[in-house]
Image (cartoon, helix red, strand yellow):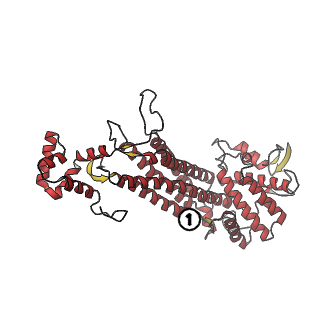
Amino acid sequence: MRLETDSLGSREVPDEAYFGIHTLRSSENFSAAGERLPLELIYAMARLKQACALANAELELLAGTKAEAVVAACERVLRGELDEQFPIDVFQSGSGTSSNMNLNEVLANVACEILGGVRGDRSLVHPNDDVNKGQSTNNVFPSGIRVACVELCDALMGALRKLAEALRVKAQAFESVVKAARTHLQDAVPIALGQEFGAYASALEKDMKRLTAAQDALRDLGIGGNAVGTGINAPPAFRTLVVEKLNAITGGQYRQANDGVEATQFLTDLAQMSSALRLLSLDLLKIGNDLRLMASGPHTGLGEIRLPPVEPGSSIMPGKINPSICEAANMACIQVIGYDAAVAAACGAGQLELNTHMPLIGTDLVRSFGILKRCCAMLAEKCVGGIEARAEVCRRHFESSAGLATVLNPVLGYDIVAELVKESLRDNKPLRKLVAEKKLMGEQEFEKLIRGATRPNLPSRRGDDA
């Protein structure tokens, strides 16, 4: 054990630990969540501290050798070599001071060793005076959340784009499959199965636009604003220089916040991102429910599509197959909706110059990104890619629905069609058969009418109106 001292007294810290006394106290104090702060947030703050060290060195506020050692220590953190050194619970000091100091201590001790010293030697590299120079938790932690979310958004967009593309492929494959649309869960006018899948893809493409807009807002960083965003204890050039260094490190397009005080007090940009994730979840939830309905049966439900079987569906009913992937996706989406509610409440709970709910906000955003990325990948790979249309069932449902009468009405007239509908219900004959028996319309004319009914005034995505 080694003895370390802070303003509250002295404590023994395990020799093998890279963290120090502040981390030790926080580990003992906080346990409500029962899980550590996500490493994605630690890594994002490490990148910021790299940029700060480089900026401080260029401004001659930190010795070049120390800055190089801190940068090298950050690289070790980013490689995942020190993951076990970050034990702090999610529910900690509301600004994230515990985790910021945890990272400062780890970086200081690693830097000490790089420079030939030993862990705990604050005279060589100090966690506050050197690693945290020009910084405050109040801007490091929220800036870290922003950097983490920007990077996680890129990963989510990749998975979401693949899912949208998979839906587009099905939209083209199913464009000639005519079925009954349903409004209020009742028979409605005809629609192509491909049009439904095309609408799903369009919805996700709109989600991507919302995510992109939210992501761009998160590129405004308050780093260097210090305690309340005024930039106290840092030279005027520090903020700009830190952002320049960060962009060089990450290849990102980060910007200095226009108003450092606003960036410290208000976390609404993070709420906007959470909201975009919630809206994506709502769309995925609706798509999942639609697929489950269309695949219901296979004999006593709609049975219009087949979902790929992924596992036996019952412990008691042999041969039963459930829409398990859609159900799993639904639960994932509902969880993200719950996280958004917590993020929204936390973002609105700031008081005066600071929001003190940042670890919760950052953690739930990281969780949401991870869930949705995996959910989109799962849907694309395990569900959408293997969906098959049951064209004969779709056509049978449509031709026995009231929607066909709407299609026939402009050609045959309201009164004639009304009589056909009554006869169809009375004799249990499809309208198509009655039209043929009464020679009211030829087979080719009937088919052309049906195909045209799914796109009466909408241009084809491929440029033709056939």
Q: Is residue 319 left or right of residue 443?
A: right
Estimate the x, y position of residue 369 in percent, counting from the top left.
56, 52
Q: How crowded is the residue under tag 1: few (<14 C-alpha within 10 Å), some, or many (20+)?
A: some
Q: Is residue 145 left or right of residue 171?
A: right
Label 1, on which residue? Answer: 217
Question: Compared to 145, does 184 lie above or below?
Answer: above
| Quarter of the N terminus within the rendering | top right
Tag 1: amino acid: Ala
| Quarter of the C terminus within the rendering | bottom left
Q: Is residue 394 visible?
A: yes
Estimate the x, y position of residue 200 in percent, counting from the top left.
41, 54
Question: Compared to 379, does 63 lie above or below?
Answer: below
Identify the residue at horizontal 15%, vertical 43% (top origin).
Answer: 424
44 and 232: which is toward the camera: 44
420 and 35: which is toward the camera: 420
As helix, strand or loop, the secondary structure at mark 1 comes to helix
Q: Is residue 216 left or right of residue 202?
A: right
Q: Check the image and name the residue furthest to the top.
A: 316
Query: Which quadrant would residue 244 be assigned to in this image?
Result: bottom right
